[in-house]
Each structure stands twice: as structure tokens, then as C-alpha cells.
Image: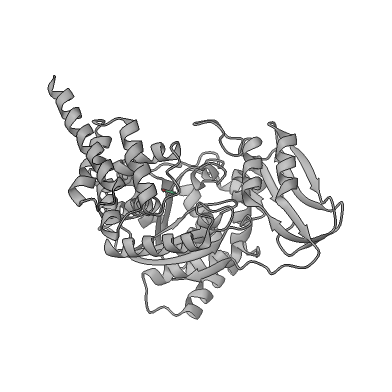
Amino acid sequence: MSEQQSTEAVASARVTASVNRKRTGAELGAEEIEAVVADFVAGRIPDYQMSAWLATVACRGMSVAEVHSLTRAYTIGGEALDFSGLDAPVIDKHSTGGVGDTTTLIVVPVVAACGGVVAKMTGRALGFAGGTLDKLESISGLRSYLSADEVVPMLRKVGMVITGQSRNLTPGDGATYALRDVTGTVESVPLIAASIISKKVAVRADGLVLDIKTGAGALIPDRELALELTHTMRDLATSFGLSCRAVLSDMSQPLSPAVGNALEIKQALAVLRGERIPGLSDLCATISRLMLQSVDVDLADADADAKVERVLQDGSAYEMFLRWAVAQGADRQVLEHPERLPSAKLRREIRATGSGWVVGVEPRAIGNATLLVGAGRLRYGAALDYGSGVVLHRRVADRVERGDIVAELHYDSGDVDGAAALIESAFTLGDEVPPVPPAVHQVF
Ligand code: URA
């Protein structure tokens, strides 16, 4: 047996023993977890053994100590960011994602315009849920990935950065995430918590706000489980010394009326220019307030809210977005004339098939409809159609009459009939006006 083969044999025996211990209810030790993750990152154990380990963890759950160890293990060997050259506290936020979740594009410039320094690492769309990185790439010329040593100069120059997440920050998460995506092990509270918080530990901002979604379009739809995820993530972040606030927010219907990459950039620009969108504006106001308070614990709610409202009304949040986007390579003229952003050539109107009150707009159906016209990926690495997507004309608790336009599909190609059918099926009408779901369920 070669030296490499014997190292691999030891690693395989170790991961199998760990699977057996976890399966029979033992608590895994920090060294054991670190060894499994390190072996996988180094390619000493095959995908199928790591999949078994992840699946066992997803089924059996993890203790607080185990999740902490896994989070640390994910960061080992990563290139942490260094903000020590800045003389202001740095703020970060994270959302568990969903449909029409345009919040990052709004709250980052809002908080930066209020004087906060915001460093936001972001990712691509996942399944039916959109990703900020893809939305940014609909702005031609904008550099969506900055290197680690460009981040601090950009923060100094502009006060904010939004950039694609480097896999090098958390090698363990980078290696296991893709495997989880294809082995049904994404929807696990400890695995999600360790994955997200490891990236936040690597960025190590001074203040962090977590936006955990609940409802049909959320990663964890169930309210109780989403609440458990909120507490797990917040406690975990605190145990790593991060100052963390959290919000449990609604994803029972799409958050923004615009769903699709350039459509959501246009929506964000409109909100930054002072337009108020029910749901989206409310959540953005709460997240912005918590972001400011995450690094200024004495800031009263009313004072934070007033600052946020002021920068939206006086144009400084909008100006901040433009300054930042231009600093990362975008053409100011295009952003000042959003009609020059990518736009689909064709439209299909979706009309109400009956009359009544909208009691539901199923977010996964809307998200899946956008995939069918190229706004998201059905195959790994597929190119996107940045102008395509859905514009919703009705939300829950709105009145519709038969034949009213409830949504509009923007497309150039794809399965247009399939997408239109999905959008039609997303709308449920009832005879009584339902309660309007609050954008924010709870703040922690
Ligand atoms: N986003 C992440 O970064 N990790 C998860 O596990 C789920 C969503």
C-alpha cells in the first residue's frame, strides 16, 4: 500500500467510525469533526462517505458544542478578511434567501448612507430562490468579485462593498455545500447554521444581522423550525464573539413584486429613489435599523428609523448605490436610466380566472416560473437571461376581478406556457379578505 493509500484508508476508517457513533447517538468531539472536514477538503475521503456523514448529522441533529466545532472546522485553512486598517466598525448581513428578496441591494446602501461601513459577501441563486450575485451581474461592467485585498480600500473609498463570496474564506463549507445541494442535506438546522455562520466568522464584521425567512418560499418553511434556526444561528454567532441581531421575516409570498435579476435591480433603484413597496420597504427598514444598532447598541429605534427614512427621502441612499456601483465598474448613465438595464423583449399577461380576494401567492411557483424563462438555472453553470422574470400586480389581501392582470411574465425564450401556468397556479382566491402577513414576524 502506498503512503497515500494508507492515509486515505485511515481517513475512511475515521469517517465511518464517526458515522457509526453519530448514528447511535454519541456526541462527536471537536477533533473528530475537524478531522472529518479536513479529510474531505484534502480529498482523502470520497463523496459517498462524506454524504453518509452529512446525512447522519442531518437526521440525528447536533448539540450546541457539535455545531460550534463544525463551524470552526469549516473555517480552518481559510483566508479571513482583515478590517483592522479601518477606523470604523464594519457591518454585515445575511438572508437565508427566497423569492424577490431584494433586501441586500437596498439595505447596504441605506446603512452606508447613514454612516455605517458595510461589507457584504454574497452568493448565486439556489434552486428557485434568487441570488444577489446573479442580480449584480445583470449590471454590465460591474465587477461582481473583488479580491480580499480590494475590499478594505473600497470600504474606505465608498463605505460599502457587495462582492461575490470567495470559496477560500471557508474551505470546509465550500467543499461540503455543493455535496449537500445534491444529497438532500441542505435543509438541516445545524448544517445551515454552521455553513452560514462559518462565513460570517471568516468575514468577522463588528456587527451582524441575520434575516431568517419562514413560509412556503423559505429554505425552512416551517415557522417553529425557522425559529429554532434563528436561535441556533444567533447563539452560534454570539459564541464566536460576533455582535448579532436577527429578524424572522415572512416568505409566504414573494417579497418584491419584481422577481428576476435586472427586474430586481430596477426595483431596488426605485425604492432607493424613495418609492414605498409594501412588505419589501417594511423589511428593509427593520433590517437597516438592526444593522445600525448592531454596532451602536445605544441607538434608539426611533432615531435609527428616522436616519433610514431620511437617507431614502433625501436621495443619499440612491447616490450611495450609484457611487458604489461605479466604483466597482458600472456605468452611471445606465443606472440613472434603468430602462437601459437588460430587459426582456416579450411579455405575457396572466389574468385572474375568477373574482375574489388574493389569499395566497405561492412563492416557489413564482420562483420556478422564472427558472423556466432563464432568470435562474435549471442546470449547473447555465447562462442567465438577465432581463427575464415576473412582475406581480397583486399581493395577498388585494381584490381582483375576473380578467384582471395579476402578473406579467417577461421573457425572450424558454418554456413560456409552463411558466405562465405556474404563475396562474400560484394565485389562490377566496371569498373573504385575509389578514395581510406582516413582513417581519419577530425581531431578536
Ligand atoms: N446558505 C448557505 O450559505 N448555507 C446553507 O447551508 C444554506 C443557505
Q: Residue at x 20, y 42 (%)?
A: 35
Name the one closer to the observer, 427 or 383.
427
Residue 147 makes an appearance in the image = no
Residue 341, picture quadrant: top right
Residue 74 makes an appearance in the image = yes
Position of 6 with respect to 137 (left or right) is: left
Q: Residue at x 51, y 48 (%)?
A: 132
Residue 389 percent across, percent down from the top left: 66, 43
Name the one closer to the observer, 139 or 348.
348
Name the residue furthest top.
1
Residue 414 percent across, percent down from the top left: 68, 31
Name the one closer to the observer, 56 or 350.
56
Q: Is residue 302 above or below residue 83?
A: below
Residue 352 percent across, percent down from the top left: 82, 51
Q: Quadrant of the C terminus?
A: bottom left
Q: Residue at x 26, y 31 (%)?
A: 45
Residue 385, picture quadrant: top right
Q: Is residue 425 above or below residue 399?
A: above
Name the one closer to the observer, 147 or 19.
19
Q: Residue at x 50, y 61 (%)?
A: 107
Q: Quadrant of the N terminus?
A: top left
Position of 145 with respect to 137 (left or right) is: left
